[in-house]
Amino acid sequence: MEKNIEAIVDRQYYFGLDFIRFFAASLVTMFHLTWKSDSINTLFWYGWVGVQIFFVLSGFVIANSANNVTVLKFVKSRFMRLYPAAIVCGLISLVVLTQTNTLNNLISPFFRSITLFPQGPFLTSSYWTLPVEMAFYAVILIVILLSKFDRISQFCKWLTLVSAFYIISFSCHVFGLVNLPMLDLDYGMKNMTLLRHGIYFTIGIYMWLIANKHIDHKDFKYLVIALIAAMLEISTRTYEIINIINVEGLTFQDFFLIPIIIFFFTIALMNVSVLSLFTIKLPLIIQKTLRVAGLITYPLYLLHESVAYEVKKIMILEVGTSQLIGALTGYISAILVAALVAMVFEKRLRNLFYSLFSKKIFIVATNKYQHFLSIKGGGL
């Protein structure tokens, strides 16, 4: 592990994004551990905004990794990023959830979870975001395939406009201005259209364009549209969540600004992080700590609803702790398990996949791809 971290920190890397990634995962984790508990359901009710932060991070990171890469390299990197952890975490969650569910009831959700199937039920509710991510990856893959990545801002423009139009329409429905229930995408395959969450990915891409000085001044108006649409989408989600929790004193009018402030503060922090990369030299120990925090974020996101829930239940029912102590203990336990996954099991499974693919699949695919390019005269 030490050698691997040393290799990572020697390269250009946005370490601040790892802190933000971990912060976002912690928000989501604490939300899920508290929002159904009567005594603490108002403490982290806004934690769901971590998902929106994740989507912005994804837009930035994917733009950064998709620039000047081949189709095969992009597909391979995305596969290695998503599937090894999903498989390991799926197995762990399966074992944990068999304590309260029959194995027969978990088989279908298990295979849907480890294959990142577009439609649930999954082992845990957090998996709903992964098909959305994969839909975004698919769009970027098409952009790379068409050799149009240098015009990524055009893609952002149209996705921003379409997504913003949907968000305005859906918000009018949620707030009772119109009655259009067909606009509710819920958490299924309809979300893969990127209508509700597309603006978050475009914000991330625009941030990457700004950081690399590839943005035209005309594009800033679309970034502003995306940010305004994000504010409206977050407000709409707040209205939905507060109505679900339905706690006396927790009103939309008084609290809707909280997730908006968290989101925009995080976006500002991301900009500071990426723009100060070449002016701030962090001590090596801090770089390593941030990198480890970033590595455990994905397993933490996948595991917290199974591992942390189970630990919380044990602490409350068997040890006799309060709901809050049980939630915090579950959170810490999920972090430790996620660290074990990221540092040991995921790494070994990824190495196994690398070995298999380098010997078979990617050699064949590369040969076919190169042959296709030669037929097309060297490019698409």
Image (tube, grey):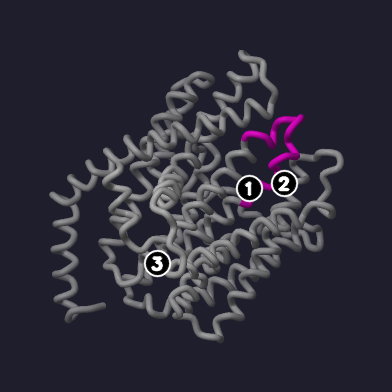
Sequence-wise first label, 2 or 1: 1
Distance from the alpha carbon under mark 2 to that under mark 1: 9 Å
Rendered location of residue 246, percent (x, y): 80, 40
Rendered location of residue 58, percent (x, y): 47, 59
Distance from the alpha carbon under mark 2 to that under mark 3: 33 Å
Rendered location of residue 179, percent (x, y): 77, 59
How crowded is the residue under tag 1: few (<14 C-alpha within 10 Å), some, or many (20+)?
many
Queried whether the magenta region covers residue 37, the answer comes back as yes
Distance from the alpha carbon under mark 3 to that under mark 1: 25 Å
Q: Which residue does the image show at 49% across and 55% down from the upper left?
A: 132
How crowded is the residue under tag 2: few (<14 C-alpha within 10 Å), some, or many (20+)?
some
- Quadrant where the N terminus sits is top left
Say which residue label 3 marks: 64
Task: Say what amino acid the circle numbered 1 marks.
Answer: Trp
Say which residue label 1 marks: 48
Element on which disc 2 rests: helix
Q: Which residue does the image show at 37% across and 40% down from the upper left?
A: 342
* Disc 2 to disc 3: CB gap under 8 Å: no
Element on which disc 3 rests: helix
Say which residue label 2 marks: 241
Q: Is residue 329 left or right of residue 350?
A: right
Q: Which residue does the image show at 22% across and 41% down from the upper left?
A: 352
Question: Most extreme residue toward the top, as rendered?
Answer: 318
Asked if residue 70 is positioned above or below residue 2 in the image, the reply reads: below
